[in-house]
Amino acid sequence: MSLIGKEVQPFKASAYHNGEFIDVTEQNLKGQWSVVCFYPADFTFVCPTELEDLQNEYATLKELGVEVYSVSTDTHFTHKAWHDHSEAISKIEYIMIGDPSQQISRNFDVLDEEAGLAQRGTFIIDPDGIVQAMEINADGIGRDASTLVNKIKAAQYVRNNPGEVCPAKWKEGSETLKPSLDLVGKI
């Protein structure tokens, strides 16, 4: 069942962030836009390419008022070790949440129960803690973080402009639509 339009469920977890261990709860995902990026495991193959790519977009996301959280079923200790030993991961400035209890992965319905690992899920969450967009990829398909920027800009525009919607391939500054009876069958 889709999580779109639903509030993030309660959780508490330990995370690695900028050389420190911190606690994170669902409350951290409220009050600003958030991206939660699940991935299968640390010290793997596709995962570091995705997380490095997400870091490459981090400054732009921060300018949009977005905080980023990566999540795997590894521990926060493993995240630190990976950060200390991988050239790609050592660049990461966003929060890396450990989910060894698998609670967060279950809450977001991305847990592969058989493997005990999170699937490649990306969630855009609004300041009220409501899921506005999600994408889940098969294990072998890496994500492109640049697509998040346009999705977030569209989600922010729609939130700030009730009654307007963003059509396919919408870019900031482009024309939007105002759904009405006049448009039915004319697009």
Image (cartoon, grey):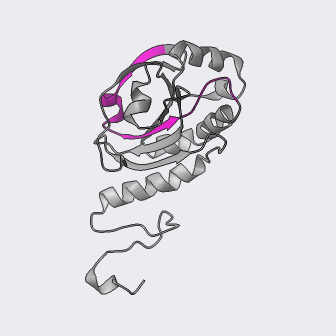
Q: In percent of the image, x 52 and y 45: which residue is there?
A: 136
- Relative depth, front residue between 64 and 77: 77
- Relative depth, front residue between 127 and 116: 116
Reply yes or no: does residue 112 show up in magenta: no
Task: Write the start and end of the magenta stretch as one range.
Answer: 21-44
The quadrant of the picture occupied by the C terminus is: bottom left
The spot of residue 22 in percent (x, y) is 43, 16
Reply yes or no: does residue 34 show up in magenta: yes
Q: In percent of the image, x 56 and y 33: which residue is there?
A: 39
The spot of residue 38 in percent (x, y) is 51, 34
Q: Relative to 130, say whether 114 is above or below.
A: above
- The residue most toward the front is 114
Q: In percent of the image, x 37 and y 33: which residue is there?
A: 107
For residue 166, which quarter of the picture?
A: bottom left
Q: Relative to 31, say whether 2 is above or below.
A: below
Q: Is residue 85 left or right of residue 128?
A: right
The spot of residue 76 in percent (x, y) is 51, 16
Q: Is residue 143 left or right of residue 159?
A: right
Q: In percent of the image, x 67 and y 42: which residue is there?
A: 140
The spot of residue 64 in percent (x, y) is 45, 46
Q: Relative to 91, say whether 53 is above or below.
A: below
Total labels: the figure holds: 0
